[in-house]
Amino acid sequence: MLQGTGSDVGKTVLVAGLCRVARRRGLSVRPFKPQNMSNNAAVAEIPGGEEMGEIGRAQWLQALACGVAPTVHMNPVLLKPQSDIGAQVVVQGKVFGEAGARDYQALKGRLLDAVMASWEEAGKGADLVVVEGAGSPAEINLRDRDIANMGFATRADVPVVLVGDIDRGGVIASLVGTHHILPEEDRRMIVGYLVNKFRGDVSLFDDGLKAIDHYTGWPCFGVVPWLKDAARLPSEDSVVLERLADGYPSALKVAVPMLGRIANFDDLDPFRAEPDVEVVFVPPGKRLPVDAGLVVIPGSKSTIADLAYFRENGWDRDLAAHRRRGGHIVGLCGGYQMLGRRVLDPDGVEGAVREADGLGLLDVETVMAPQKTVRNIAARSARFDTPIEGYEIHMGETDGGDRVRPVAIVDGNGEGATSPDGKVLGTYLHGLFTADAFRKKFLESLGIRSGDLDYRAAVENALDGVADGLEAHLDCNALLAAAR
């Protein structure tokens, strides 16, 4: 199990890389994360039936690294934040309920049984399971109900490798401090540590390694440099959005407002991989750039709340001006709902506000409903007649006049909606732009030359590149030997 000295230390990429290392060595390997907090979700199998459920996108990526189909048991507890104090709780792929932060702490004890049941299922038929922690085991104020780090590791008897991030500074203190404050029961689970995201000459950190050894006695499995291939992998944690706010000159600028409850923003990753496309995530307080050729409103965990957030930031005025200039607009999932005339929530699925005016750029209306649609989709583009493989994760149904011009055809039925002039479209299909033929035709319709990018192959190559880096800089033999 890889646990971090904090969030965003690179655990997700390291687990994916180690899964690919083990797979290339002929091992049957699986990923596992007891508890995840993310609005970037993926569709996964619920074993034993035809139903599908949700897991974090990180575990979907790690399953890809293992060469296996993702299942809900790889991430049994998924928290999807939908307000500053509360989240939707998904257990083994299905919505369990909603809980505020304090309520969830009390709920954790009941969820541990589900975590342990999934742990047994995830490991069936595998030689190795690589587990990703969440946050930090040093959060000892939460230890008595922990299911994400040492609470799981001690219950499942899983050896722990501690990951420190040297790029953010203070790595010696974070590793030594974690050793110092952990109770003995937890400290004995740690079999060593590694340092991630090093830049420059690693020999300059030799004295740092000696200091860590002096204070902890833990062996070091290696120092991992900043791996350029990691940047080509889908990102899960919204922390990275701060680093995606700066763009670079290109033929097409794609502006993406950073909604308060933004979800599945990795939908934009295929555009980021295109050489003539610049994707700029626009933070709160900043205007949508006037030189953007395309504005994409991404998914949202709370459509009505994010509609209010959109207006608070003045993005509604920016979007209207963009439309008047002849700019193109795409709404994905929650963004699709926001583009319509109204969003109705008669059952209070999202909260106390039961109705909100949409942005009015598509002639559609959405009615929220408690039932969630979770499924993989094989479709064809209605405009370009190209294949599309994507997935849906949403609550609510959308209908209206602009649906006579669908974005895609799914099982003979139209999906999504397009404005009469073709410049505004909305769809529930996540992963739309991962389809190479569709993305190529779409960009060409905007006057942009698209290369011959095979996006899925690029992700596979990036996983191999990360695995190569870990083989070169970590003692992978010792890491594998530490597993039991």
Image (cartoon, rainbow, N blue to C red):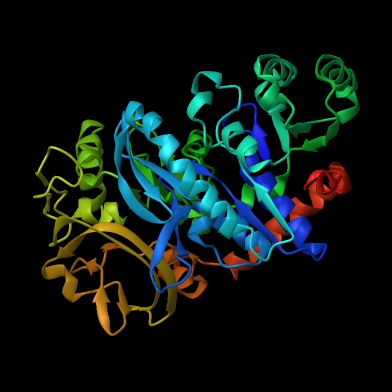
Residue 453 visible (yes or no): no
* Residue in the foreground of this view, choosing between 454 and 167: 167
On screen, residue 423 versus residue 11, left or right, reads left
User: In the displayed structure, would residue 360 be above or below residue 376?
Assistant: above
Looking at the image, which is closer to me, 43 or 422? 43
Q: How many marks?
A: 0
The quarter of the displayed image where residue 350 is located? top left
Residue 150, how many percent across, how many down? 61, 32
Task: Tell me if 163 is positioned left or right of 69 in this view.
Answer: right
On the image, the x and y values in percent for residue 125 come to 67, 66
- Which residue does the image show at 71% across and 36% down from the upper left? 160
Above/below status of 161 relative to 472 = above
Spot occupied by residue 169 in the image (x, y as percentages of width and height) = 68, 20
Query: For the N terminus, which image quadrant?
Result: top right
Q: Nearer the viewer, residue 215 or 104?
A: 104
Q: Quadrant of residue 85?
A: top left
Q: Is residue 100 visible?
A: yes
Q: Position of residue 245 (x, y in %)?
A: 47, 37
Q: Residue at x 20, y 66 (%)?
A: 419
Q: Give the farthest residue toward the bottom.
A: 412
Which residue: 75% across, 62% down? 23
Q: Is residue 466 left or right of residue 421?
A: right
Q: Quadrant of residue 120?
A: bottom right
Q: From the viewer's side, name the closer residue of 426 and 430.
A: 430
Residue in the picture at 79% in, 63% down = 24
